[in-house]
Structures are given as C-alpha cells and as structure tokens.
Amino acid sequence: MRLRSDSPLNSAYNKLQGNFADADGWNIVVDCGQPDKEQKQIETGSVLADWSHIAKVIVRGDDADEAIAGLNADAAKMEIGATIAQKESVILRLTSDEYLVLSLAGEQEEILSKTQHAKVKSYAVGGGYACLVLAGSNRNEVWERSTAFDLITDKIGEGRVIQTSVHGVHCTIYRMAGKDLIVCNRDLAHFLMDALMDVGHLVGLMPTGVNVVPISFV
Amino acid sequence: MSKVKRIEKHDFISLPSYSDSFTFTFNGKTITANEGDTVASAMYAAGQQLVSRSFKYHRPRGLKDNFGQGPETLVTIDHAPNLRADTIMAKKGMAVISQNHVGSLENDLMAINDTVIRWLPYGFYYKMFHKPKWVWKIVEPIIRKAAGIGSIDTKGHAVDTRYEKRYRFPEVCVIGAGPAGMAAAKGALDAGKKVLLIEEQANIGGRSQHTFVNVNGCADTELNEISENEAGKLLMFEILGNPNLEVMTLTQVFAVYEDNLVAAYSGTDLFKIRAENIVIATGATDRHLVFENNDKPGIMTGRGVERLIAMHAIKPANEAVVVTTHNGGYHTAKLLHGAGTKVLAVVDGRSSVSNTKEVEEIKALGIKVIENQTIHKAKGSKCVTGVAIGSKDGKQSGESFNCDMLVMAVGYKTQLSLLAMGRHKPAWDKEREVLKITKDTPNMYAVGDINGYASFGHLYNEGFAVGQRAAKGEVAIEDSRKPEDNIMALPADIECGGDNHFICPCMDVTRNEAIGSIAEGFDQVETLKRYSSMGMGPCQGKTCHEAVARLTAKDTGLGINDAAPTTYRPPYNGVKLGLLAGRAPHLGPVKRTAMHAWHEDNGATFLNAGQWKRARDYGDNLQEALNVRNGLGIIDVSTLGKIEISGPDALKFIHFMFPGKFARLAQGKVRYSTMIKEDGIIFEDGTLAHVEDGVYYLSTTTGNQDAIEGLFRWWILTDGYEAYIRNLSGVNAAVNIAGEKSRDLMEHLVDIDMDNEAFPYMSCREAEIEGVEVMLFRIGFTGELSYEIHFPSEVGESMWSHIMAKGGKYHIKPFGLEAQRILRLEKGHLLPGVDTDALSNPFEAGVGFTIKDDKENFIGKAFLKDFKEKGIRNRLVSYKLEKGAQIPDDGVAVLKAGEIVGRVSSSRYAPVFGHGVGLAWVTKELSEAGTKIQIRCANGSDVAGEVLDHCLYDPEGIKLKS
C-alpha cells in the first residue's frame, strides 16, 4: 500500500478540529466538526475548504495548444483567462503557452496521456500545489482584505481565471458560481490559509472540508 | 464657561435629539456625552473650554473650528497620542488626557515660555548654546524634551491593536460628502456607475448639516425653496437608496497617489482605493485671520459654532461678537441667538450692507450691526473675556465688548491638499481671493467650495454635472461661479499692534517672528518656512497656508504665487504607523516543508532561510552533529531547489549556464558544479544529476531556486534553446540520511542494490519506498556516507515517519540546519552567499576545479579567464582553533602581526574534535597549510588559528566513498 498523501493544509486543519477521511490515498479534511453550521455559513458568511488532493496537470510549451487539443478540441481557441469547465474537470488557460488542468483526484495519469506531445512538457503537479476553496455569499469581505486585485466587483466573472498575489502569495484563482478556487505552491499554502483565516474569521469565515464544499468545477 | 449647556430647543431650527448618553474622562474628570458627540463637543458641552497647550509658548488653546483642522484639540485618547478630539467620536469609558504641559493643564509651569522665549532671538536654538560645544550637549536634550506634543505609548498598551488593510475598486470615488460631493455621487450613480463616497465626519451632508438658508437655482427643483439643511437631507436620502453607492463615513483620505490610488483610513482599517475616476469635494474651511491674541480659547470659526449648535445641541457661549465679511456671518449670528447666546454685535468688514435681507433680519432680533470694521484684539487670560474692534487697517480703534466668545466668519480657504498632492502648486485667484489649483489632472475632478464659495444650488449643479462627466471620464466643466458669491478677504493680519498675532498656531509662529526672520535674510518662502517652522506643525498648513502666503508676499515683496506654501505632500493628516504596517503575520509569506508539522511536534526551533522556516535544531545541535558522526541522522532538505532540465538542447543549455563540462556525465551519475554570473563571480553551487536519457536534475541552494529558474527561462527565451524547465522544488520533498549506518537503513527502505560498487558515490538511482517512486542521490554535504531521497511532497510527512520508524533500529535521530552547518565546516564545504560575496571568484574560493574554460562560450567565461590570468590574491581556507579557544562570530577580522589580512566567513565549534573550525578569507601568502593566524573576536579578544591544507574531517573522502 502506498504511503498516505497529505494536504499541506492538514496541520492547519488539525488545529481547527478538522475531521479527515481518505480520498484516493489522500488524507483530506471533510469538515471541521460542525458540518451543519459550516453549510449554513456558505449562505450567510464564507468558508474555506481544502481541495488539495485534486489532480493538477500543467501543459506548457510552444505547442501547448496542440497538446491540450487532446483533451478538448476547443480549449486552444480560448483567450487567456478563459476556462472550459465540466463538473469533474476544468481547463484553465493561463498564458499563451500554458494551461492548467484540474480534475478529480486520481485523474492525472489519464490527463497526462491525453496531452502527450513531443514539444510540450505536461506534468502532474500533484502535491506541489495546494488548492483552497473560498466559498460563500460573504467572501468579498475576505477578498477585500487579502488582495490588491479587484475580486470584489464583477470585473472578473464566473468561469474566468486570473493570476495574482494574495497576501503576497502568487495564486491562480478560478472563479465559479458562489466559490473561488485558489491554487498556490504547496510550501506557501499553510501561510496563505493562516492569512486568509486571520483576516476572515472576524468577518464570518469558517474553515470547512470537502463534504461541505464538494468538488465541482462549475 | 460654566454657562455652556445643552439646549433642548432652538428658536429657528430643529435640534438633534439623542437618547443615549454615557461618560468618559478628561484628565480624570467625568464628562457626559451624548450619542453622536465628538470628544471635543462633549467636552465643550461639559464646560471644558481649555483643551490643550500650544507647542512653544504653552498658551491655552480651545476648540476652534470643531472640524479637526488645527492643533487646538490634540489629545491623547486611551494611550494613543495626538488625536484630534473634534474628529473622534466619543465612546463610553474613554480616557482622554491633555498634552504638552508640566503640572496641570490649567496651571502649566511651561507657560513661562510665553514670557521667557519672547526675550530670546528668533530661532534661538540655531544661535545660542552652541559655544562652547559641550553646552549644546546639555541644552539639546532639554529643548528636545520640552518640544513635541504628545508622548508615544512606550508601555505598549496598544500592542494588541488589530490593523487591517482593505481594498476598494470604485468606478467613481467621491472624496467629501458635502452638497457638491453628494451631487457628484448622484451624477455618477445616475450614469450607472459604482460610486464610493468618503466622508471624514460622522455624517454626510457637509455644511448643509448646519446651514439653514433657503436653496434656489438648483437644477433639481425639488430642492429649491427649502432650507439647505432640508435639501441636504433629501439629497442624502436619495443617493443612499442606490445599491451602487457605498458610503464610508469617519474615513480620512490622507493621500491621492498616481494612477488614482486613494489612501484612506477608518479607525484601524487602512483602505487602498483604486478608482477609475476621482472627484475631490473637500470643500473649504473658515479663514484664519491674524490679529492680536487670535489664538485664545473662546475664539471660534463661524462654521465651528454652527456645528456645536445644529449638530450637538449646544449653546456655545453666553455673550458673543461675530466678525464677518459675508452673509454667512449673519447666519451664524442668527443660530447663536436662537440657541440663547446673546450676540452683542455683528462686525462686518463690508460697507453699505444695511439694506440686505440678512442684515435686516439680524437687526430685527435686536443685534447691533457695525459696518466697515473688524476685530483688533481679543482680551482675556485663559479665555476670551472681551474684544476690541476698529478699522480694517488696524489704525483706528473702535468699540470694545465684554463677551466670552468671538466668532470669526471671514470667508473660506479652499482645502487643496488632496487635489494638489505633489502634482500641482496652488495659485492665487485674485477675483475670488482664494488659492486654487488651476491645472487639471486626468480622471480627477474638483467640485464644490474647493473651487471657491458658492450657493447650495450652484454646488449641486456643478457637482451633478461633474459626477456625470466623471462617470464617462470626460474633461471637467468650466467654472461658472457668480461674482456675488465672491467673499472679500480682510487684510491677512489686522495690524493694530501687539506681539501675539499668530500666523501658525501649530508652531506658535507670530507675525513679528516671521518679519524678524525675513529681516535675517530668510526672505524666500522655502527658507522662511524652514527657519520659522511656519506650516510645519501637526496641521501641516491646513490652518495657515493662505495666511502664510499672503503675509509672506506682503513682507517679502514676492508675488503671492511665489510666496504660496510649498508642495502639498502625503499624508494629509497624521497616520498611525500601525496602519501603514498592517497585520504583522502578513508582512511576508512563509514557506513550510511537507514535514514541518513533524518538526514542530518534535520540539524543533526554526530559523528563517529566505522565506523558508527550517528546523534549526531539536534542542542540542552539538549532539545532533555527533549523532551523524557516530551513528545516523536525518535532515529535512526539502527547501533545496529542484529543477529538471530536458529537451533536445538540454546539454547545450547546461554547457552555457554552467562553467563545467557535462557531456561525459553518464546517466545515473551526479556532479558538483558552481554557477557563475556574467562578471565571473560565484553565486551558487549544487549538484547536477543525469537522471534519465537527456534529462538532468539540478539541486540548488534554498535561497536561489526562484532566481535560477528565472535565469534559466530568460536564457531559453532569449537564446532559443529547445530545452524545458520544470521547477520541482515544491513538487518534491527531500531528506538526507547521513552517517555510517545510512547504507544499512537504505537497504531496509528500498529494493535496489545499495552496495558501494552498484551505487557508488556521486551517483543517482530510481527506487521505490512503500509504493512511492523516489530518486536517490548518493552525495555528502556533511562528509559522511549519505543518501538524499527525493519524493513527492504529498507523502512527505508519512515518508519521514516511515524512515524514522525503520531507522529506529539504527537509532536514527533528526538533525537541524545548525548541526548541518557544523558538519559541513568540519568537512570544509563552502556555502555560496555565506562564505562568498559579490567579489568572490571561484578560483579564490577553492572551487576552480568546476571551471572548464577550454569549452565554448558560457556565462562568465571572459571574466573567469581574466581572473585566472591575474592569479590568486586571496583564498578561502579552512582553519582550526586551539582547544578551549573562544569561538569567533561569523564575519570577524583575521589579523597577522596586528594588521587585518582577512575575515572569517563561517565559524563553529566542532564537537567531534573539541575545538573550533571555520572558513576564512585570507591573503594568498597566509593561505598555506600550517600558517598561524590571529582572529579578533567581537569582544576584542584574539584567538589563534591554523590554516588547514583542505579540511579537518576525512580529508581523503574515504567515508564518503566507501
């Protein structure tokens, strides 16, 4: 049996009374002990969940457009900052020659196989990136305290991806209906979560897990 | 002032009614406040007219404009100094303390300055006490102690204050919520824009909150023929209902920077506002008139008095005289009369005004109107007890009145700071007799009284039109103020004799002092300002800027535009440093390894290595080092940079980036290499492994990984290498298992042949541990047989725990960075950036073996050739100390015969030898093995050292290779 995989946020969630469960070999937080309250908080405040176990594949190179076509023929037609999302996966166009594909845990091998190309480096980032989800009606209260980028008006709408700094951490942010997915380097994830919770807990931000904010990329 | 009181009704206006009252203290005295009171208004209502002492002469000062412009209301509130009592809302239980006095506020011993300093020359501290030199050393601290206003809270009462940093992104940001600001907001809202309206006071409405003249000429006809107060409320209710409007009250904008960045704070929250368009509607405040004793408590501005009455339901005084130059003075007099204050006279600087409606109305109330005269002098000791009036030129005396209040309603000075803010200098508008900014700034608009006084109707029309233009980013409208709105300016100083004509109330600068300074040669505004300190006090010229300009022009003969105050710069008001700093936990990102929690749980102390938190030790770094030497240790080296290089041009690229040759680096082999900058200086070292056919894996030091990745990408982009870079630094975690038992442990961990011949020193292998693919590197920074294991970060903690469990049999112990530093010094390994600096070339650093300059061009080749030709001048050498010798600090000097001949770069106690070891830069002559050197410790004592041939520990590398 393979060694257990841990999210970089597990130690932070441990301190927040997180309950954990196995998800495709990953030990991942499912809730923080008050799932009903956490669920309600999505409607009245905001929550921070951990999706770090999802599959993450970077497709980068001069011929990235050709490589990504193996996954979705329309992906290369997207402008930078656009996305193609389905419930179980999303393709994010980050730059002219770089895509980030996110999918359910354990899907990375299939994504890699479909995006193989001689001149493109597709690789699974796996545990190298952390994925936090900021969800809830009141999450702008957190954003306005966390980034100099305008995420509190409607300038960056649902289905868009941007890369910016959040509390000094370079992040890729994918906006969905009612929630935002924050992807950052693993080594900075704990700091980022601390910072988000620090500014957020006074304005209704609660930690939660994947049972309260189940994975869906739309 | 015992006759000051709250009033429940007013003859002419409705008063605010407050249900909630509470108490706070001022200098220990209980003050009762109503909901909606500022600290200053509550104190005034309680009869506390004396609020502070002036900066230099310690003259008594009291509430003046009730708007927070001047220095009069600076107090300490709950240990926070220099807060303006008329801008802080009163709160239950506050402890308010007065500042800048010795003894009580009422009986300030330092008030003797008002007599003594008058006998000293202007700027006495520049001229006196400097000879003999020792005198100044005694006098300076006394002067410094006497100067200043509030005292910093050195006891840290506010240490837990939570400062937030927040952002806003309005399409239109309106600064100032008076009639023009509200109308501008309405204009922009009507255009469908998202608007942020910022007001520094508790309520929006600006002057309309205390102005009750009827409105006419307003484009919104519903606002005509009602009082300005009612019109303001209607306008306020109309815009407040718009969902696209956000209103921030009690919010102070303190700067407007380039690219429309507005900086503001509210309480302990700092706001950074990026606005597409900015409308500045900061208005105007009552003019500061200079005359004898113009600083006494009891002298208030017209609007200041109106605020006390209309917004706080206070009867300001028992008997008052109003000095004015415009109809607003009559409005003030009427409000005073209605509040129960006996207005003895309205002294109007204009002539032939008796037939106007306002004058007739005042006369009908039994108030005397005196034309074509003005104030000459305020009388009284600690507060006003009377006034003398006379001609405007100050030469002819007139009547005197006994009264406890003098109201100055002599026109308005424009509040230009935010509009100018380092961009434009104000210019004097001769027609309106105000300072103005005449140049436009793109996407920035000025509306309202900031352009010169105008009626409510005019302000509304102007504000609305500008708001609409701001919504579209169109150019501002032309000013269309009517001549009848102009307010005449009295002479800036009423020259009727006396020494107490205060131009700058913040710094206690009088007219005589300014004239004296000019006579000494400081006859340009820049030098005059610096010499006399005019405009350099807490209000930063907001009170005096116009008076300074006019009087400097008069006294120097300069044109008024040349005498105008110097550049307005941020901050507009005092800003707490805590606000600018923000939340301490967010000052810099912190990186943690995948095994950080284990280290934390097992007692590690951490040190900062760049952004990383690295385990420094687990309680005893010397024992940790010995564990490695005598048994088995494990260290978390996840912070090392890990960069994969592949592609058809990978080798070609490597040959360009690195100074060595790698064509013969076989698959499965590892080589140590330096990295050299264009100037031939060593900046990095690491190992390069040939892990797969055409795929190389570079380990870099912790601090340089991002820079190296950026460098690689830059050269690939610019030189067109077909090489691919993957920064796996975060993707992979890593540990190093070191010690003579490390092979034994590895044999239990992996399923590959770990025999020395099968897996020799400086080679790498793929393997598997508990279902996880890992990469093994046999390298040795510590000088021991050791293996570095790289594996996916997500299994970091479980991998570490697994190794610890398997290693228990061999008594494996974790060791931290400090132990590693000891071990590498025993082995004589350098650390770039620690043992090298911006002048260290690889030949002198002892790593010249990594340079192969017979290959084609590579980074740094030209300079390396030059270095080689010039030869060695200094050398980095290992040294040892005698047993028992003090361990020098890193960086101390190396001496020979008393002369400095080098420096220690790294120094530690080596537990395995029982004495100190280190690396030091010395001159070539001293670099021979066996040379005795002298090292001067930080405490001044010298220790003897001996230069080593190579290193002390296992110089032949037998342990590494066996």
Image (spheres, rainbow, N blue to C red):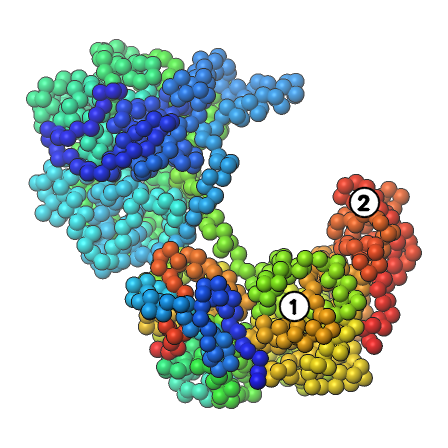
On the image, which quarter does residue B126 sit in?
top right
Say whether residue B390 is left or right of residue B697. Answer: left
Residue ID at (13%, 30%): B9
User: In this view of the protein, which residue sits in the foreground, B918 or A194?
Assistant: A194
Say whether residue B138 is left or right of residue B393. Answer: right
Say whether residue B546 is left or right of residue B336. Answer: right
Please report whichever mark, 1 or 2, sits nearer to the chain's N-terminal start. Answer: 1
Residue at the right extreme of this rendering: B930
On the image, which quarter does residue B850 sit in?
bottom right
Circle count: 2
Element marked by disc 2: strand
Percent of width and height locating residue B193: 25, 59
Callout 1: chain: B
Callout 2: chain: B
Image disc number at residue B636: 1
Other-residue count near label 2 (Cα within 10 Å), few / some / many at <14 / 14–19 / ≥20:
many
Percent of width and height locating residue B915: 83, 54
Residue type at mark 1?
Asp
Reply above or below: B32 against B376.
below
Which residue is labeled 2 in the image? B936
